[in-house]
Amino acid sequence: MKESRFGLSGNALKGIAVLTMLIDHIGAVIVQRTCIYPQFDTEFWNQIYGPLRSIGRVAFPIFCFLLVEGFLHTRNVRKYLTRMLIFAVISEIPFNLAITGDLWNQSYQNVYWELALGLTVIWLIRIMEEKPVAVFWQVIWTVLILALGMVSARMLNLDYGFYGIFSIVVIYLCRKNRLIQAAAGALSFWWELPAPAAFLPVVCYNGKRGRGLKYAFYIFYPAHLLILYIIARAIGCPY
């Protein structure tokens, strides 16, 4: 897809995703708990909890889009997937602490696991696309790979379940036209309003990575969860 000098770079989109994710997690880790704790002004916190979580719905769709872009432009998918899995492991304890207060909890997993599985699914789909077989069989295999990925997401209790895998695949399959990709991506998130709004900045993506900060975004995820957990504990939020 042709790049443009104008618009939002990949790092700008990451910045939007990270900011909205932070807002969402402030709501989930701190505000949600103050709503049920008598020593806090529960009426006030109840009023801001909903808006914080609504803003946060924008983050995951952008991460899904950026995952697909990273996959399309990486020189080594295996290294890309390995990096995703390493940070999934690193993030597991901070995620568990922030969400449940426990070091180990398997009720559902941090978002890196979902992204890693989504990356694996579209990688397998591309392998099938590159094989010299009839379109009919490519479609069949794509559906089977997608179904396997969605079932795996459900069995592994991933954060966004099979919905996340489905959306990643939709974004990948519509990659040749940005407007169609954004529209299809928005429709794939019909189940979680206002998540479709995430594709408004996606339409403005200029196809460029932007300056540096490659690992800063990876590190931010576990770091901010751990910091929010420490803050929640410091102000007496219950777990």
Image (cartoon, rainbow, N blue to C red):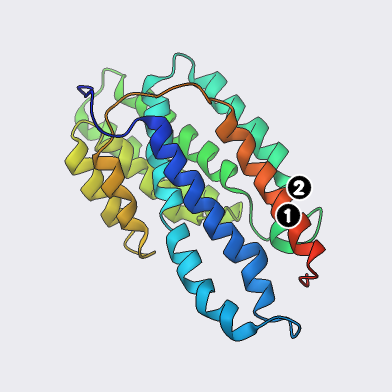
Place of residue 29 in the rendered image (x, y in percent of width and height, measured from the top left): 66, 63
Tell me the element at label 2.
helix
**Amino acid at circle 2:** Ile
Relative placement, left or right, of 135 versus 26 is left
Mark 2 lies on residue? 93
Residue at 23%, 23% in the rendered image? 5
Residues packed near mark 2 inside 10 Å, few (<14), some (14 to 19) or many (20 plus): many
Residue at 40%, 24% in the rendered image? 210
Between 26 and 151, the one lying in front of the other is 26
Tell me the element at label 1.
helix
Q: Residue furthest toward the top?
A: 75
The vertical placement of 201 against 191, above or below, is: above
**Amino acid at circle 1:** Asn
Residue at 44%, 65% in the rendered image? 54
Place of residue 114 in the rendered image (x, y in percent of width and height, measured from the top left): 53, 45
Query: Can residue 86 be spotted in the picture?
Result: yes
Q: Are marks 2 and 1 in contact (CB under 8 Å)?
A: yes
Tell how many labels.
2
Relative placement, left or right, of 43 versus 58 is right
Looking at the rendering, in which quadrant would you find the C terminus?
A: bottom right
The answer to which image quadrant residue 173 occupies is top left
Relative placement, left or right, of 116 versus 199 is right
Mark 1 lies on residue? 96
The answer to which image quadrant residue 221 occupies is top right
Query: Can residue 147 be spotted in the picture?
Result: no
Between 139 and 199, the one lying in front of the other is 199
Place of residue 61 in the rendered image (x, y in percent of width and height, measured from the top left): 40, 48
Looking at the rendering, in which quadrant would you find the N terminus?
A: top left
